[in-house]
Amino acid sequence: MGELSDLTLLESAKRLAAGEVSSEELVQACLDRIATVDPKVRAFLRVDAEGALAAAKASHQRRRSGIPPLSPLDGVPIALKDIFCEVGKETTAGSKILEGFIAPYDATVVARLKAAGVPLIGRLNLDEFAMGSSTEHSAFFPTRNPWDLTRSPGGSSGGSSAAVAARMVAGALGTDTGGSIRQPAALCNLVGLKPTWGRVSRYGVIAYASSLDQVGPLSRTVADAAALLQIIAGHDPRDSTSANLEVPSFSASLEDGVKGLRLGVPKEYFVDGMDPEVRAAVEAAIDAYRGMGAEIVDVSLPHTRYALAAYYLIAPAEASSNLARYDGVRFGLRSERAHTLGDLYAHTRAEGFGAEVKRRIMLGTWALSAGYYDAYYLKAQKVRTLVRRDFEEAFRQVDALISPTSPVPAFELGAKAEDPLAMYLLDVLTLPCNLAGLPGVSVPCGFTRGGLPIGLQILGRPWDEAGILRIARAFEREHDFSQRAPVLT
């Protein structure tokens, strides 16, 4: 592995500031690494070498001219989950129905990255329309976990997690609807941050479930995640769900530790069927926090048992509405077999959507239909309120909650592909956070005997990203888990 490939985002930024390396060299190191290992991992759908090198050259010229950096990450390359619109670039959301779609504008997060001088090196694989937990539902190919190429990197941001874990880039953006940043981070030994719903604009992000989706970073360190969030966070008038709140410094309190904090351990998050090595690693992490001076408090989130069912009614219902726009008329795939308008809708959607997307559209449409709306969708929304109230009550007692991120480590590709319910159960510890709109982060906390990563989840009060990052950093500082890398040649 080349030296530049080993650098984190902020280490790269430090080397740039010292004049020890150029942005072009950083981008080229990523391109070389991608050429070496991505044929095995398959994290990238498309690599934009020309665009990334052009942005790197512009960054280098600014530095040579004495112009102050546009941001702390000016000149440091990252990659994007292929769900963010970027003007002039193909954006597919991992679906055949959008294959060849060229975005006419930049998503707000893309515009903010460009304004910060960050080269964008390519587009990363995902479960189609972000619907999945394994990146096996991509319309193009599955992505493999760099820690074990026979296993899943998680999903739906599996391409993002695999690319960062394999040192092809030092950071990436993903989206989290029910755990799609945190779960792949846990399975790939990364830091994955889901901000509070409304903290980051969703304008230009291809929608799955609008009341649940949130954009966030995947990186190798907590400080890197804070630096990326600092660039993309903030109010956007083009997104009606974007919170008009001042953006704090997410890194100011990173090194403050946890002494005196009260950390809650929800009993409902240690579920039956949890892998015993995951349980042991998380219990060891809880003991470590106790040793660092935190007070550990047992708490209860009693409606957690209903969260999974509520989520898999609400998310598909919103998906059925959001995906109605893919009809063969305005953009994307248009079936050549259609002779009437009805045929156009039916054939285009049948040919363009994969099996999992069709499953969720049908489930959501059914839940919203006459005679079922009150019994299912409306009741699920009431359960959502109860889940949120559980968190509110818990946060009256504690500063944050800690739990496993995923009940199991990385599983073999294909192991759950034919069992949708087993796949849905992988989200049982992450999706309540989305139902309540809370911030959550996964941080590496150990490995199985077989060398597979394990993640620790930290959940916080709304808008307290700085707090959960501080708690994550306290653990990271005392352990070397995040410094370990998979062996890929």
Image (cartoon, rainbow, N blue to C red):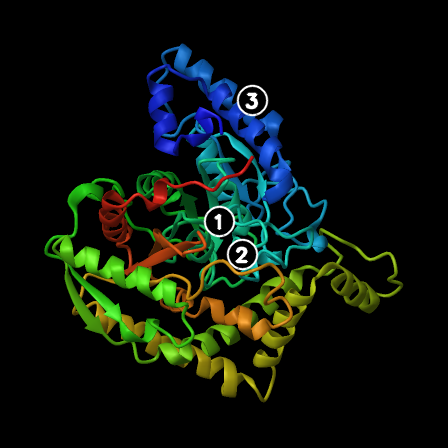
What type is the residue that disc 2 sits on?
Ser
**Residue of label 2:** 156
Tell me the number on the disc at residue 129. none
In the image, is 216 to the left or to the right of 102? left
Front one among 282 and 380: 282
Distance (Cα) linking label 3 and label 1: 24 Å
Q: Please count the marks in the image.
A: 3
Q: Quadrant of residue 454?
A: bottom left
Distance (Cα) linking label 2 and label 3: 30 Å
**Residue of label 3:** 54
Tell me the number on the disc at residue 174. 1
What type is the residue that disc 1 sits on?
Gly
Distance (Cα) linking label 1 and label 2: 8 Å
In the image, is 367 to the left or to the right of 347? left
Q: Mark 2 or mark 3, which is nearer to you?
A: 2
Q: Quadrant of residue 212?
A: bottom left
What type is the residue that disc 3 sits on?
Ala
Label located before the other in sequence (3 or 1): 3
Label located before the other in sequence (1 or 2): 2
The residue sitting at 22% across, 71% down in the picture is 394
Q: Are marks 1 and 2 in contact (CB under 8 Å)?
A: yes
Q: Which secondary structure, mark 3?
A: helix
| Residue 188 % position (x, y) | 46, 50
| Residue 138 % position (x, y) | 64, 55
